[in-house]
Structures are given as structure tokens and as C-alpha cells.
């Protein structure tokens, strides 16, 4: 099994989970705050829809909640190494900066993971008729 056939490849590169070819999101918009959330409707290669049903990505919120919690813990640990006493203001400010800064990334990762849970890899793309 090559790297390109793994779920991790699809997740980290935001590729279509079915063929690992088409992009889930518009290219080059990751750090464009107006456009990072825009998804392509379907895979440009195999035609897999990226929104199987309305509200499909509701569940992806739990994954992004998990990311936020992990970030929270990470920030706490880092701060306690850097300063003698971690104040609440310090904690909240750092967290806001990091969570907002990484929002496009966590947003896309959680959707990418979520879609990968439901759509299985079916080998290289078979062009749609
Ligand atoms: Zn595809």
C-alpha cells in the first residue's frame, strides 16, 4: 500500500476520500479568511459528492471540538513552561490567537476526517460518464 492510498494522505491533503485525486476545497484559499470554508460540490475526478446530505458536517463539529481541546491542553503546557504563573487572561488571549489562527486548518481537517469516516477509498479515479 503506497502513501497515496492511505486515509492519512487523503485527510492531510484534503483530497477526495474515494479516489484521492480531486480536491475537497478550492485551491490556494487555506489562509483566505473569506474563502477557506468553501468546498467543492463534488470530486472533479470521480464525481463523489462532498456533501452527501444537508447538515452532513454537523458531526465534524465534534472533531473540531476535539482539536480545540487538544490545543487548549497544549497551550496550557507551553505557557506553564514559558512563564512562572499562568494567568487566566494570558491563557484566554493565547488561546484565542491560536484557535483563530488555526481555524482554517482545524475546520478543513475536521471535515476531511469526517468525510473519510464515511467514504471508502475505491482505488484510482474512474472518470464519470
Ligand atoms: Zn474522487
Image (tube, grey):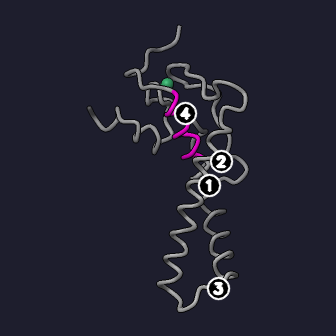
Tag 2 near tag 1, CB within 8 Å:
yes
| Sequence-first tag of 1 and 4 | 1
Instruction: Return the residue at label 3.
Output: 87
Instruction: Return the residue at label 1.
Output: 31
Left or right: 116, with 68 as reference point: left
Instruction: Return the residue at label 4.
Output: 115
Q: CA distance from mark 3 to mark 2?
A: 33 Å
| Magenta range | 108-118
* Quadrant of res 95: bottom right
Q: Secondary structure at mark 1?
A: loop
* Quadrant of res 56: top right
| Sequence-first tag of 3 and 4 | 3
Q: Residues within 10 Å of mark 1 (few under 14, many from 20)?
A: few
Residue at the image position 61 percent from the left and 67 percent from the top: 98
Q: Residues within 10 Å of mark 3 (few under 14, many from 20)?
A: few
Tag 3 near tag 2, CB within 8 Å:
no
| Sequence-first tag of 1 and 3 | 1
Q: Residues within 10 Å of mark 2 (few under 14, many from 20)?
A: some
Task: Decide: is 5 above or below 37.
Answer: above
Instruction: Return the residue at label 2.
Output: 36
* Foreground tag (1 vs 4): 4
Q: CA distance from mark 1 to mark 4?
A: 21 Å
Number of the label disc, if any, that sits on residue 124: none
Q: Secondary structure at mark 3?
A: loop
Amino acid at each position: 500500500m503506497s502513501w497515496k492510498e492511505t486515509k492519512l494522505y487523503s485527510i492531510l491533503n484534503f483530497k477526495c476520500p474515494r479516489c484521492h485525486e480531486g480536491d475537497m476545497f478550492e485551491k490556494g484559499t487555506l489562509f483566505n479568511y473569506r474563502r477557506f470554508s468553501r468546498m467543492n460540490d463534488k470530486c472533479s475526478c470521480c464525481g463523489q459528492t462532498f456533501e452527501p446530505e444537508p447538515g452532513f458536517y454537523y458531526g465534524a463539529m465534534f472533531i473540531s471540538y476535539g482539536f480545540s481541546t487538544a490545543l487548549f491542553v497544549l497551550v496550557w503546557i507551553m505557557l506553564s513552561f514559558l512563564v512562572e504563573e499562568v494567568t487566566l487572561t494570558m491563557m484566554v488571549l493565547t488561546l484565542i490567537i491560536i484557535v483563530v489562527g488555526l481555524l482554517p486548518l482545524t475546520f478543513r481537517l475536521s471535515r476531511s476526517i469526517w468525510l473519510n469516516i464515511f467514504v471508502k477509498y475505491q482505488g484510482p479515479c474512474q472518470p464519470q460518464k
